[in-house]
């Protein structure tokens, strides 16, 4: 896939990714969300995409308000380049890969991704990095169909939530 110059919309990216577009887009957004200053739009987009995952029939629809949102093509190119490298590496090393076995866990994954996306919105410097990486691992588990990676991501999400609670508590005590 060749990216245009300038800016690209999230809808454009979603339309050009294959059948697992939502998971791949969440993976890319999570990687972008770990960058300074990019966590707000990435966190909001992850929250919006995760709502579709929580729907009973797993509606993988990108809301129009998110689809028109644009990001710099250089940021997208950077994230996609790293995402492809990670996916290629994971294809060799991820244990427990298997087809679409995690599809029935999409509502749980959606709820966890919603919480992680919300954590990325907290305005404490660098507090977006851990939730963004955990969201990327969870999306990767869904793309690869790895139950072991899925369990590790869920466990990491609980750890990220506890870490965020401690961080918020410490920050509120400073005020």
Image (cartoon, rainbow, N blue to C red):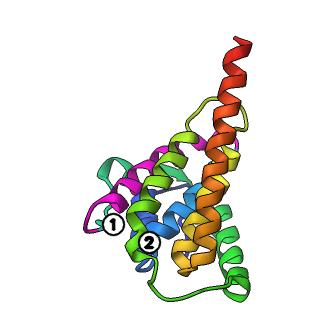
- Front residue of this view, candidates 154 and 33: 154
For the C terminus, give its image quadrant. top right
Is disc 1 placed on a helix, strand or loop? loop
Mark 2–mark 1 distance (CA, rounded to whole Å): 8 Å
Going from the N terminus, do you reach mark 2 or mark 1 first? 2
Q: Is residue 44 above or below residue 60?
A: above
Q: Position of residue 143 (x, y in %)?
A: 53, 76
Seen at 71% across and 15% down, the residue is 173
Is disc 2 placed on a helix, strand or loop? helix
Whether residue 7 is visible here, answered yes or no, is: yes
For the N terminus, give its image quadrant. bottom right
Residue 73 is marked as: none
The residue that mark 1 highlights is: 60
Q: Are marks 2 and 1 in contact (CB under 8 Å)?
A: yes
Q: Residues within 10 Å of mark 2 (few under 14, many from 20)?
A: some
Q: Position of residue 128 (x, y in %)?
A: 65, 42
Q: Position of residue 29 (x, y in %)?
A: 55, 56
- Front residue of this view, candidates 149 and 86: 149
Seen at 41% across and 67% down, the residue is 106
Seen at 31% across and 53% down, the residue is 63
**In the image, is residue 131 part of the stretch drawn in magenta?**
no
Q: Position of residue 39 (x, y in %)?
A: 60, 43
Residue 21 is marked as: 2
**Magenta residues (range):** 36-57
User: Which circle, 2 or 1, is nearer the viewer?
Assistant: 1
Toward which corner of the image does residue 152 lie, by quadrant? Answer: bottom right
């Amino acid at each position: 896939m060749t990216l245009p110059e300038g800016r690209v919309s999230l809808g454009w990216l979603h339309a050009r990714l294959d059948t697992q577009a939502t998971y791949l887009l969440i993976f890319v957004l999570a990687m972008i969300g770990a960058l300074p200053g990019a966590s707000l739009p990435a966190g909001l987009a992850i929250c919006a995409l995760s709502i579709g995952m929580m729907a009973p029939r797993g509606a993988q629809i990108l809301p129009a308000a998110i689809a028109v949102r644009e990001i710099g093509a250089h940021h997208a190119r950077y994230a996609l380049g790293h995402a492809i490298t990670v996916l290629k590496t994971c294809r060799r090393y991820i244990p427990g890969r298997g087809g679409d076995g995690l599809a029935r866990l999409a509502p749980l994954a959606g709820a966890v991704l919603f919480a992680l996306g919300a954590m990325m919105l907290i305005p404490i410097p660098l507090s977006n990095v851990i939730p963004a990486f955990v969201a990327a691992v969870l999306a990767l588990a869904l793309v690869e169909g790895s139950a072991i990676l899925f369990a590790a991501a869920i466990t990491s999400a609980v750890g990220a939530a506890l870490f965020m609670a401690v961080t918020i508590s410490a920050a509120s005590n400073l005020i």
